Amino acid sequence: MDKQKIINLVVGPVATNCWIYAYGDNKAAVIDPGDEAQQIIGALRKSSLTPEYILLTHGHFDHICAVRQLVDAYDGKIKIAIHALDSEYLGPASRGIHQKSVESAMGIASLLDTLWKESPCADILLNEGSEIGPFTVLHVPGHSPGSCAFWDREAKILFSGDTLFAGTYGRTDLPGGNEKQLFKSLKRLSELDADIAVYPGHDSATTIGRERMQYL
């Protein structure tokens, strides 16, 4: 196997990118498993990958709905990691905050009833500069208070969540969103090396170089 391997699965009702990132000896991180757990598990097994981590770029429902099933499928051996400021989106008390978020996004919370699976609490709370697997954590708030990006410095790969997309950026009108913080985060990302490949939470991949002129 190549040192890195990236598998993209588009899951759930709002077409969320779930990324499987393989590294080392068949280890993997599952980034933003938003729904369709069986598809994700099938992709891991097809590639003979053992997931070490579920890495969440932020806590919104469309990025976490398959967390419970993945943890159960791997007998609790896969560790859940999220930025400390978004940790309230996980665990038994989290439904209320998701309901507010879905109502803000869609005007009605009924979608949550069909998707909701109570997730475990996080095993690992991340902060700026945390190291996990092959990644350094960049705290990039604005879309949510604890939005973060996962940066593999050596491979020049960045998973940007809903902060930076190809040609655009994440919304700030959901609970906890902050436009001023988001533009500060975008400027920070734009100052990274131009050849860094960016894999966002929705839509197509891009590079820092393609996006940077909008935010410098």
Image (tube, rainbow, N blue to C red):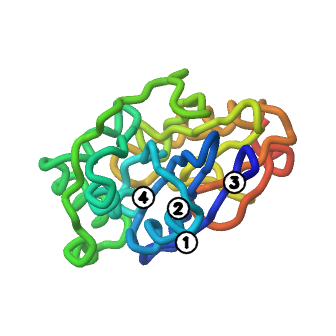
Callout 1 touching callout 3 (CB < 8 Å)? no
Marks 4 and 3 sit apart, C-alpha to C-alpha, by 21 Å
Query: Taking 92 as reference, is 12 above or below it?
Result: below
Marks 1 and 2 sit apart, C-alpha to C-alpha, by 6 Å
- Left or right, residue 161 beside residue 120: right
Identify residue type, mark 4.
His
Callout 1 touching callout 4 (CB < 8 Å)? no
- Left or right, residue 69 beside residue 152: left
Query: Could you say which quadrant of the image residue 66 lies in?
Result: bottom left
Identify residue type, mark 2.
Cys
Query: Which residue corresponds to mark 1?
Result: 10
**Residue drawn where x is 76% and y is 38% of the image:** 155
- Characterize the local packing of mark 2: few (<14), some (14-19) or many (20 or more) Cα atoms within 10 angstroms: many
Mark closer to the observer (3, 2): 3
Marks 2 and 4 sit apart, C-alpha to C-alpha, by 8 Å
Query: Which residue corresponds to mark 4?
Result: 63
- Characterize the local packing of mark 1: few (<14), some (14-19) or many (20 or more) Cα atoms within 10 angstroms: many
Q: Which of 17 and 43 is in front in this view?
A: 43
Callout 1 touching callout 2 (CB < 8 Å)? yes
Query: Which residue corresponds to mark 3?
Result: 5
